[in-house]
């Protein structure tokens, strides 16, 4: 302080300096800050009041919701329906087991140093669907059959997205390889398949699956509604998957193909041992992103009459017993989706950053 | 099967303009006869003839764009030729994929940019082809791979990934990987061009050691020192043609063709 | 590859070892499989339709539809044909797509730029907007706007009113409709003249700049011409424009332009949702122009505005345009969610009601898919042309 000319090196910026730099750096920035700040304060306040301070959390009946805030009772009372749909109460443990396995497989993926997390992920992609195939519908091992028309809620949403992505992965790989094939006819077939599916909205695909699929099949052969939706979703998704994977294939340098050729590896060995492992690793973020959009798109199945989580909520908000709970219902569903999608997208961004640095040598 | 092949090549080969073919034919491991190649309408390789004896070490040099890389890439059919013949170890390279596979098994190749597989460890890189192409048991393949890694002096890096190694180390791994197939011929496509100057020597040392062991080598390089010490013959290419072919001593002290003289002036003149 | 000559291969390989023949074989098998699959499907479909008594062919397009549609841009009533319903649906799809594209672009660019603002509050707010909106399903957002927001608006008698000419209630938004009178042609004429003049001015200014180096304020002058000429014409012709105001008639409003709540909800949701993606595209586009480019421009002495106009924006646009068009495509496809709230778009009217009434699933689905395919291929075509035009020439 004795020598005013010599400023000490800045270690920490005081809050005041920070504000001057980031909020009030010029007259129009100051104006902007004040106007926007005012808007934020006036909207966030009432929002929080509605969401929490005035909201009703406890109680058993619609009449317990008296405040001016949100009526969260509606959610807690119907939560079972929103998660399991019409799945019978006594068998819900099967779904819980699947939820648990899902968490066991994929939570470690977010933890950098978790031992053997690769194997957990791999099981999630291969073993988990098999377990689910036996557990959820039942019918084997003395498990009672639960028809797919009774499945619903969050569980159905997860089933649709999960099966959609896993089934579309191998088809997408084949399509991507086909699109890069040197054989013009194979390439042409793949291009047409991919581009047609990518051009049409999922709604039309779902309509087609539910209306036209029965017409396509030979007499006496038919699928349940859920199965038809899954077939439609898988075909549609595999076109997107193919494009993501093609991006990875294109990013593999020519030298890798040549080195594999020079070592005498044939097409399938070259593809399976050298090209695909690298390409797939490169496009994991892309695959995760398509998963996020598929996850959001599964809500469309309510249009063909399946009860996914949005479908279950939509069907109960009009319940005359509860007054004006639409916003609460939508906020709840939005929150569920947001947590999933935001979490997964963060994961994919991290991965992208890591892969990005990993490839620079 | 091999016999009929040789008969045919000799029958047609005798009419071809290959003077050195007759006397060498018993020991010639690579024979290239009137080979031509086009990229679209561009004539990249013009009427090339070459005969390489077992154990011979050949250096190919020339200005960039002269077709020298394309030429050696034709020898294991990374590039396709359109006219003439390439016969490697008594097998003619035709459209027959069995021939291509066999030839590729006998010919090792080292690339300018190493082209190691980044997702596999050094050891896995080396074992890949013995296991999947030669169907060697894994343990045997790994032992053999370690031997070769020792020979290129990096056994301690066996479990690292290529990205963790320096350029010189990577190129030595690439050489070991090619050797693991126990090839009869090694092709080198500018193996030192992508390396930092201080790493060139370690790679050249390995190559010199390899040459001393009697391996048949075709090497595209600008390392004239290497050519002088190791090569049996130096081939100079320009504009897709073989311009001059001579033992290194003659080649460097008394080049015949003006194009060779000009090239040597340019690269030796500093 | 072209110079393939056979003479150099006296003994060709056995056919099954020749890669060319192998590839022909595989392709033949692929074609055969596709045809076999296609034939089986067609065969199954035909026999199924016959057994269910569904007629085939496109004759139904000329039959009377017999159902009403709540909104149509072209004259329509229930006595018209199914072909007409198709057209009505198509127009409605195109309308909401066009409206959505305009709004999403404007909002998206604003948010994208705000995301890069030096103002911390603005940047964070933009970030929150993007992260919240794009991680919530579009259908949910449409429901939210339609059922929760617009559904809770007052009834027509208690409409929100602005100046006696704008009304908002749970039946929609009512706006005054401009009706052109005789003599309005003059205004159109003036507008055309103004556009031609501006184009001419631009050419002249460019030529002059090339010749003399002087820069003419084309933008300001051109803008002035575009505004002043039509306004002058409007006044000269004696203000030939009248407004048809909406008014309460019985239980509902009549007159003026009506934006039905279905359209409004769909439009708002589509625009806000797509805008969150566009904002990210804009942000990464601007960030993709390396700092070196700005520095180089400044080192050449270009002022900030020109740096932006001549160096940053052209390069950023090159990065922005391709993903932007794919967002436009997504928006057009997503407009089919209209079905869920009953906005009469192509899918709702044609694939919904028409299909249900006629039962001719194959024809209806094929036509609908063909429409989306056409839209998508058209946009990709323009995209490719654009890409070729702006591609940076590289070695």
Image (spheres, helix red, strand yellow):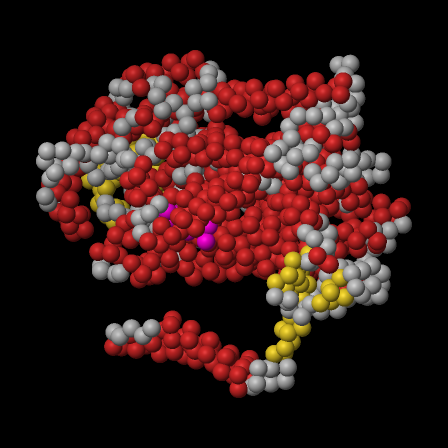
Query: Residue at position x 68%, y 29% from top?
Result: A73
Image spot of residue C263 (x, y percent): 66, 56
**Quadrant of the rendered image containing residue A20:** top left
Any magenta on residue C114? yes
Query: Toward the viewer: C357 or A52?
Result: A52
Name the quadrant containing residue A170.
top right
Q: Is residue C15 left or right of residue B213?
A: right
Reply above or below: A228 against C256.
Answer: above
Q: Which corner quadrant holds the C terminus of chain A? A: top left
Q: What x and y, as percent, mark residue B91?
A: 43, 33
Residue A217 visible in the displayed image: yes
Does the magenta stretch mainly form a helix, a strand or a loop? helix
Image vertical order of residue A343 relative to residue C166, above or below: above
Give above or below for C116 relative to B8: below
Residue A321 position in % (x across, y down): 78, 35
> Could you say which is closer to the camera, residue C105 or residue B268?
C105
Q: Which percent across, then down, holds residue A38?
A: 45, 47
C8 within the magenta span: no
| Residue segment shown in magenta | C110-119
């Amino acid at each position: 302080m004795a020598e005013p000319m010599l400023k000490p090196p800045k270690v920490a910026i005081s809050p005041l300096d920070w504000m001057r730099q980031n909020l009030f750096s010029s007259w129009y920035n100051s104006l902007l800050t004040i106007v926007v700040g005012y808007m934020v304060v006036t909207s966030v306040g009432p929002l929080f009041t509605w969401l929490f301070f005035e909201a009703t959390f406890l109680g058993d009946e619609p009449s317990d919701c008296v405040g001016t805030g949100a009526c969260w009772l509606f959610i807690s009372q119907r939560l079972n329906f929103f998660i399991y749909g019409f799945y019978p109460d006594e068998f819900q443990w099967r779904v819980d087991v699947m939820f648990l396995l899902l968490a066991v497989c994929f939570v470690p993926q977010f933890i950098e140093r978790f031992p053997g997390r690769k194997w957990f992920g791999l099981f999630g992609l291969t073993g988990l669907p098999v377990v689910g195939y036996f557990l959820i519908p039942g019918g084997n091992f003395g498990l009672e059959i639960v028809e797919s028309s009774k499945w619903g809620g969050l569980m159905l949403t997860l089933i649709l997205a999960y099966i959609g992505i896993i089934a579309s992965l191998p088809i997408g790989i084949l399509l991507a390889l086909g699109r890069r094939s040197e054989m013009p006819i194979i390439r042409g077939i793949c291009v047409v398949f991919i581009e047609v599916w990518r051009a049409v909205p999922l709604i039309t695909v779902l309509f087609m699956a539910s209306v036209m699929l029965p017409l396509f099949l030979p007499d006496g052969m038919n699928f349940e509604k859920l199965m038809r939706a899954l077939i439609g979703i898988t075909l549609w998704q595999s076109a997107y998957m193919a494009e993501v994977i093609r991006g990875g294939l294109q990013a593999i340098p020519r030298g890798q193909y040549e080195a594999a050729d020079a070592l005498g590896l044939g097409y399938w060995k070259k593809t399976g041992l050298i090209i695909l492992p690298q390409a797939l690793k490169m496009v994991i973020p892309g695959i995760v992103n398509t998963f996020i959009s598929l996850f959001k798109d599964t809500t469309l199945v309510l249009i063909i009459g399946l009860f996914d989580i949005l479908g279950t909520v939509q069907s109960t908000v009009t319940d005359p017993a509860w007054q004006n709970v639409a916003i609460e219902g939508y906020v709840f569903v939005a929150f569920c989706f947001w947590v999933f999608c935001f979490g997964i997208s963060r994961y994919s961004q991290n991965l992208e950053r890591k892969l990005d640095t990993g490839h620079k040598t | 099967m091999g016999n009929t092949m040789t008969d045919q090549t000799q029958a047609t080969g005798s009419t071809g303009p290959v003077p050195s073919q007759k006397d060498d034919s018993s020991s010639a491991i690579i024979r290239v006869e009137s080979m031509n190649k086009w990229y679209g309408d561009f004539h990249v390789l013009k009427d090339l003839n070459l005969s390489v004896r077992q154990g011979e070490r050949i250096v190919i040099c020339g200005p960039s764009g002269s077709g020298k890389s394309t030429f050696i890439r034709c020898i294991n059919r990374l590039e396709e030729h359109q006219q003439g013949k390439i016969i490697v170890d008594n097998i003619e390279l035709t459209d027959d994929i069995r021939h291509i596979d066999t030839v590729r098994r006998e010919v090792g190749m080292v690339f300018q940019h190493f082209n190691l597989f980044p997702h596999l460890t050094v050891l896995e890189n080396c074992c890949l082809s013995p296991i999947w192409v030669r169907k060697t048991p894994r343990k045997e393949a790994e032992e053999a791979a370690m031997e070769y890694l020792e020979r290129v002096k990096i056994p301690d890096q066996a479990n690292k990934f290529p990205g963790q190694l320096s350029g010189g180390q990577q190129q030595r791994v690439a050489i070991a990987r090619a050797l693991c197939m126990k090839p009869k011929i090694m092709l080198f496509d500018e193996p030192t061009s992508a390396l930092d100057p201080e790493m060139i020597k370690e790679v050249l040392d390995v190559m010199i050691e390899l040459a001393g062991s009697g391996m048949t080598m075709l090497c595209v390089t600008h390392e004239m020192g290497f050519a002088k010490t190791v090569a049996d013959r130096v081939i100079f290419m320009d504009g897709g043609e073989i311009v001059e072919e001579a033992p290194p001593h003659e080649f460097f002290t008394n080049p015949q063709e003006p194009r060779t003289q000009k090239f040597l002036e340019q690269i030796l003149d500093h | 590859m072209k110079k393939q000559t056979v003479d150099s291969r006296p003994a060709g390989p056995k056919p099954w070892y020749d890669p060319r023949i192998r590839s022909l074989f595989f392709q033949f098998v692929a074609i055969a499989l596709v045809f076999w699959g296609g034939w089986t499907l067609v065969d199954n479909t035909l026999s199924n339709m016959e057994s269910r008594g569904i007629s085939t062919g496109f004759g139904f397009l000329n039959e009377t539809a017999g159902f009403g549609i709540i909104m149509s841009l072209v004259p329509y009533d229930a006595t018209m044909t199914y072909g007409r319903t198709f057209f009505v649906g198509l127009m409605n799809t195109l309308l909401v797509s066009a409206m959505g594209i305009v709004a999403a672009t404007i909002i998206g660019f604003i948010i994208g730029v705000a995301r890069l603002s030096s103002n911390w509050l603005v940047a964070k707010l933009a970030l929150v907007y993007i992260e919240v909106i794009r991680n919530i399903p579009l259908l949910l957002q449409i429901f939210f706007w339609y059922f929760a927001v617009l559904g809770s608006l007052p009834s027509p008698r208690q409409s929100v009113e602005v100046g006696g000419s704008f009304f908002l209630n749970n039946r929609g938004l009512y706006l005054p409709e401009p009706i052109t009178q005789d003599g309005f042609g003059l205004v159109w004429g003036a507008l055309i003249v103004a556009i031609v003049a501006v184009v001419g001015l631009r050419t002249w200014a460019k030529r002059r700049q090339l010749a003399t180096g002087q820069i003419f304020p084309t933008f300001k002058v051109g803008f002035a011409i575009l505004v002043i000429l039509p306004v002058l014409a409007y006044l000269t012709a004696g203000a030939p424009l009248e407004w048809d105001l909406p008014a309460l008639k019985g239980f509902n409003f009549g007159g003026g332009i009506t934006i039905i709540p279905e359209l409004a909800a769909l439009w708002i949701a589509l625009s806000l949702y797509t805008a969150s993606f566009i904002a990210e595209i804009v942000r990464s586009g601007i960030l993709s122009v390396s700092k070196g480019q700005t520095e180089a421009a400044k080192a050449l002495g270009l002022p900030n505005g020109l740096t932006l106009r001549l160096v940053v924006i052209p390069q950023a646009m090159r990065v922005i345009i391709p993903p932007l068009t794919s967002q436009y495509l997504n928006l057009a496809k997503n407009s089919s969610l209209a079905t869920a709230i009953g906005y009469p778009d192509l899918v709702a009217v044609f694939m919904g009601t028409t299909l249900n009434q006629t039962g001719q699933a194959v024809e209806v689905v094929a036509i609908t898919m063909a429409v989306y395919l056409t839209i998508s291929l058209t946009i990709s075509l323009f995209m490719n042309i654009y890409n070729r035009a702006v591609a940076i020439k590289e070695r």
